[in-house]
Image (cartoon, helix red, strand yellow):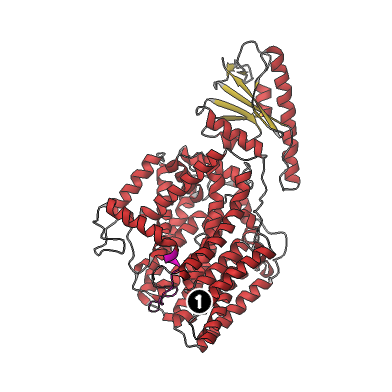
Amino acid sequence: MALPLVLMVETVTSMIAVGALVLIWWPTYALVQFSEMDGIDRLASNATRMVLFLIVIGYLLTAIQILSWMSLAAALILLRLGVPRPDASTERGDTNTPISRRLMVELNELVALPTRLWAKGPRRGTEVGHQGRGRWSWYGVAATAGTTAVVAVATWMRFWQNWVHAALPYSDAYVLLAWMKDIQLGRLFPDGIYPKAYMLVMAEWSQLGGTNPVVLEKFFGPAVGVAMVLTAGYTAYRFSGKVAPGIIAMLCYGSLTFLFPYTVDRQAASLAQEFGSVFALPTAYFVYQSWIQPTQRGWRWTAISLLAVAGLVHPIPLLNASIAAVAATLGGWMAAGIDRRLLGWYLKWIPLTALLVALPIVLPRALGIPLYGSSAAFLVSNAAGPAPPLNAVAAVAAGACVTLFLLHLLRRRDGTVITVPLVVLIALAGALLVQQLPRLGLKSALLSQRSGNFVAFTEALGLAMAWWLLEEIVAWVTSNRPAAWISLVLAIAVSIGAWRTFPPRPLTPYAMTSDAFVAAYVDIATSQPANSWLAVSNDLGYSFALGQGFQIDAPLFVSHVPPTISGTWPRYAPGGGAPSYPIGQREIFLFVNHRYHVADLGTAGLAYARADRQDTILVEGWLKAWEAHHAAPKVFFSSPQLTVYELQEG
């Protein structure tokens, strides 16, 4: 069972529109533009800095309880007014050009963007991964078609399950949904301290787009999964300066997920760690560029912003981004030496970034707010099993990096090109080291269960280096001319062959509830006035009702709301001699399950199923007693899994 089609289309359309406005269009006016970057790098820089702004302003607005679409719009306008304008004009026109005229320029560039991103052109100077803008070309069309195909397949794999099923994947979804709604209600840490950056961004998206929080969270997670695939391709493309390695990285990471030691089903769910992971891998590219071009400030400011966002979202992405930064720094030093002024800049700003990352945890802790219990326990818990064995993909990726490095030396390439495979190799080694820490005695459950993602990222990047090696060999043999075309055609052919051999399948994460349960709550919330209704269901319904209505657990309702009291409306009896009073909501919805959803959680799933069964027995008994003394309740929602009965005042 899926959610209503119109609601899903409206939500996805609104999500895309808000993203285009906040991450792509508005930053070209509100943020300083770095002339050393071309279009795709500037886009990544703008989006990263804007996400950092949204997180920081989200914390501030929620702390003073004024988070709304109006306060967010005001903050975005103030950002435009507060950021100093550059003296020189940029590629997008002088900053004093009227916005209406600049908007037309933006739209024109947007139409031409797909083929311009992949257009062939010469490498500019020593900038790794930079190609000339070029003109429309058959090569650009072919590259765009190949890229679109691998991204489309990855998108389908991550979105399909959410499109055809109403249930929210993973148990974390219900906690994150409640926290997102708490933020919209001005409550930052109601259950204890936990990094809320991801929930803040989702809450802001919901406010700016006017979307239902449940439906937005449902599709925001898969969108993040697609963004992870794009970052793998982006990093491979910019490091190599070639299209085909980027396509291979996205193909492997996005479609051939069985290659990597990572539970990729998480990318179809809405999880903070996955959101933070979007910013981990590009950190390597921007840090590397900052050492190659130490006088250009854009690279270092974007690099520090990537680290800040990763840290504010989740500690694991911060660890991964730090590994990427260290690898890029070592590679940059080998390529261009140590620039003392830039080193001093990093030594000043990294502690300030660490302070910014720590503030949302340290400040509320100093105010006496406790840490979120289950997360604090997971943070210090020990892993039960051994470290996973090293897989063959890691060996292939490492071997390709070493061979490519030696080939670049043999061909006497520029130092900035020679050291790129070493950056990937060091990042891969760091990721594997974290995963193998149990062999050294550090058996952290957090690291052992969550370290596979960065291993998958670096292995995908290593496979992209293997394809770059293939293209270099072809170029050596054919005197360069057809090498790019041959590599691109082979990459597209390999993609098609891989899909024929290993047909893509939608990711299928587990869910804690049935489709009908979520669909019924969304139906109630979208059809009833806010806060006019009360739902009687299991405790997972709290997240769906929060901020839109009210929810009460079935045992509590049955024990405190006698069905035989005379009158036309149920009365709540607190007990202890206190007088009863009529329930304040004018609509009461009682959930009666017919099939009991067992999540893929072993004994925990069975426990939820048993609890659902007990709740159903209580509610059915209450309804029979109510019908004996009053009119029969109406059926509001009906499916093979669930029936929702409605009591309506008057």
> Which residue is drawn at the image coordinates 64% and 54% (left, top)?
265
- Residue 558's place in the image compared with 606, above or below, is above
Query: Which secondary structure is most common in the magenta stretch?
Result: loop
| Residue 450 in view in this figure | yes
306 horizontally vs 398: left or right: left
The residue lying toward the viewer, choosing from 515 and 328, is 515
Q: Quadrant of residue 23?
A: bottom left
Q: List x then y, in percent, for residue 517.
A: 65, 36
Question: Residue 404 location, x and y as percent?
Answer: 55, 81
In the image, 302 versus 319, the foreground residue is 302
Q: Position of residue 543 (x, y in %)?
A: 58, 38
Horizontal and vertical percent for residue 337? 42, 81
Looking at the rendered structure, the kind of residue marked 1 is Ala
Quarter occupied by the N terminus: top right
Q: Residue at x 57, y 71 (%)?
A: 491
Residue at image x 51%, y 28%? 531
User: Considering the image in quadrants, where does the C terminus appear?
Assistant: top right
Q: Residue at x 47, y 80 (%)?
A: 417
Question: Which element is circle 1 on?
Answer: helix
Q: Which residues are magenta?
A: 115-131
Residue indicated by mark 1: 484
